[in-house]
Amino acid sequence: MALHPELRTTTMRILYIAAKSPAPVIDGGCFAMMECLKGLSKLAEVDGIILKTYKHPYTKESERILAQYLKKQTVVPMKTEISPARALVDFIRRRNYNLSRFKSEQLYRVIAEKLHEKYDFIVCDSVFAAAQLSHFDTTGLPPVIIRSHNVESEIWKLHAAIEGSVMKRFYLRQLEKTLREEEIDILNKATVLWAISEEDKNWMLLHTQQKNIRLLPVSVDLHPEIQTDYSKDSFFHLGSMNWKPNQEAVQFLVRKIWSDPAIAPFKLFIAGSKSEHFKFYNSDSIEVIGWVENSSVFMSQAGALITPILSGSGIRIKLLEAMALGVPCITTTLGATGIDIKNSGIQIADSPESFVEIVLKLHGNAGLRQELGEKSRNYISKVHSFETGIAVMKETLEG
């Protein structure tokens, strides 16, 4: 997929499409998108089409931050609020509601107009950013790269598996089925897929017709200026509560783990976007903090990260950020997707009892917390460096 020789003498141009504003960084998805955008801007001149949604509004701050990496910014408002009526219509017509919320005639016209300019590549940051491609004849487009944050249909498959209500489980299974069909169709339209984890790459190789799939790990800064305090024997969960797996994790953490008398007195912090809505969990030992201005500083001073992820797909950005700081981490096997468990220092627990056992092991043992944290930091420096990501992008774009 190398560029024609005559194109190598000019500046490479990329049309970047994002399903939400990457800036400001308010969750793991934004973080991954910003790192991708930073890498692309090092290699090419990038124009952006940014969807403006109610969860991720495009603000003056968004414009200011993105201007550092995008030559031109085109913002398209998108109504992604949940509408039961639209969901019912899509269900009856066997269309996937998750994806249809990211399609509109206005977006189609904007993309079509931008394509009058000459671009060497189109980079869609997530399958939602690529959803509109179903309206185009991709044979007439520049090479399309889809950067997949996770396998979306796998998330809903797991949601359905743990849903207790028969009617809701039926709906979620139908949602997963239509999402899987459309997701595969979208991924098949790309020239190249960038997978975020080895597990996702293997899924794509198995379920799509794509052969040109490359592993593009999320780049994570080590922040050497921030020193983790290993004397803190508290625990914390940090993540956007807009994301259902984080909601499930916090509920499991409070109801199934911190209910154990052996660890119930230990301090537990719950923080992140929208977490303030969970203030009812506050107690003598549990403190719901809400949004934190600087997540890196917070994590370095809050003890060990504990995140019992029960559903979802792809790699957990907040977990990588904590590891990069040298913070000891506890998660599930699913939560550790995309991470080399043996060499990364993270601790794995898949039951309330095993979580309690690890919490007891780390509490009061500053030496062990430091040993595990430093092992995690070293792992991130080798696998998730900015240089590693740039190398994958450069190889893809230059052929």
Image: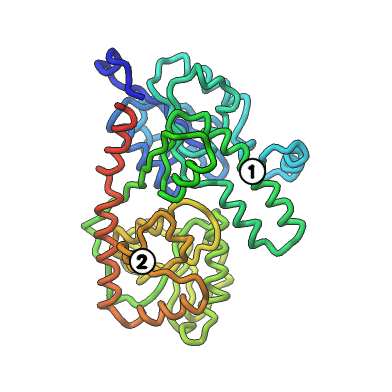
Q: Position of residue 137 (x, y in %)?
A: 56, 20
Q: CA distance from mark 1 to mark 2?
A: 36 Å
**In the structure shown, which secondary structural element does the residue marked by tag 1 occupy?**
loop
The residue labelled by disc 1 is 81
* Mark 1: amino acid: Glu
Q: Position of residue 87 (x, y in %)?
A: 72, 42
Q: Quadrant of the N terminus?
A: top left
The residue labelled by disc 2 is 346
Q: Quadrant of the C terminus?
A: top left
Which is in the foreground here, disc 1 or disc 2?
2
- Picture quadrant of residue 33: top left
Which colour assignment does the render follow?
rainbow
Tell me: residue 360, above or below residue 229: below
Tell whether 114 sits left or right of 219: right
In front: 111, or 377? 377
Tell me: residue 6, above or below residue 98: above
Tell whether 244 sits left or right of 168: left
Q: Position of residue 54 (x, y in %)?
A: 57, 42
In front: 222, or 289? 222
Q: Residue at x 28, y 38 (%)?
A: 390
* Mark 2: amino acid: Ile
**In the structure shown, which secondary structural element does the residue marked by tag 2 occupy?**
loop
